[in-house]
Amino acid sequence: MNATIPSRPSPMRPAGEEKSGWLAVLEQGANLLQQATPLAGFDVYVVGLHCAKDRPGQQMEAHHYCRVVNEDFLQCVLFDGNTADANLIGVEYIVSERLFATMPREERTYWHPHNYEILSGQLAAPGLPAVAEKALMKQLMNSYGKTWHTWHTGRHDGERGDEAPKGDAMLMWSFNRDGEADESLKLHRDDAMRLDTAGKRDHRHDLVELARPQEGVDAMRDQFSGTRPVEGVAEV
């Protein structure tokens, strides 16, 4: 890891025996002779919080490593930490508002809005200077994500997950109001990674003027209680 980014180890050690000698030889050969071309360029790192759609209690931290394909499309691989032992837990595709608008209505129900994650300060790009991080968040304003988790490895604040991927892939959703994300989940991440979510919210306040109403903001609103709306985050 970059020395400026605090390490965030995975909360789950997968089931299975330790690596044998032949695996070590294989890895050495791969490092020397094989090129991981499809993974080149997945160098945009952001960390956020997800919940399973229509399962508000199933929440977790997600570390995204993304490749910017073009102005309208990013693709990300998701891990439960940012160290060498992190587990691959899913994928996320991110599209601009323009590209989202071309999709059939039924398809759009799979895509969650991003404005709350940005304006609340919840989405962070650890290691980036504040100016660069804000430029990234400005680019992501009004965008949408389609996220599938294939493995629930648990939470860093204590909830134990599965030792191996089980069951169907889970469609994930974004938080869209204050009070939806578990406070313990947020605080544990912010303390461990030295993130100032409140400060990021203040720093991004001027992005509110760029925000447009988005589809999906109210998709899970009634599944939470005691929540509060945020300026700039509204359903179409």
Image (tube, rainbow, N blue to C red):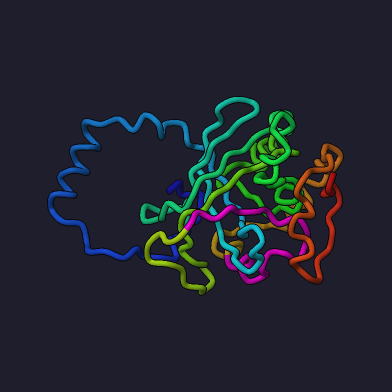
User: What residue is shown at x 73% (from left), y 38% (from top)?
Assistant: 105
Horizontally, residue 113 falls left or right of residue 228, namely: left
Q: Nearer the viewer, residue 62 or 97?
A: 97
User: What residue is shown at x 50% (from left), y 56% (from top)?
Assistant: 6
User: What residue is shown at x 46% (from left), y 49% (from top)?
Assistant: 3
Horizontally, residue 221 falls left or right of residue 16, namely: right
Q: Which region is colored magenta?
A: 168-188
- How far across and down, in percent of the image, does residue 161 sit? 46, 68
Q: How many marks?
A: 0
Residue at far top of view: 70
Instruction: Say above or below: 139 vs 17.
Output: above
- How far across and down, in percent of the image, does residue 195 sit? 62, 57
Horizontally, residue 132 falls left or right of residue 193, namely: right
Q: Nearer the viewer, residue 22 or 150?
A: 150
Residue at far left of view: 21
User: What residue is shown at x 83% (from left), y 55% (from top)?
Assistant: 230
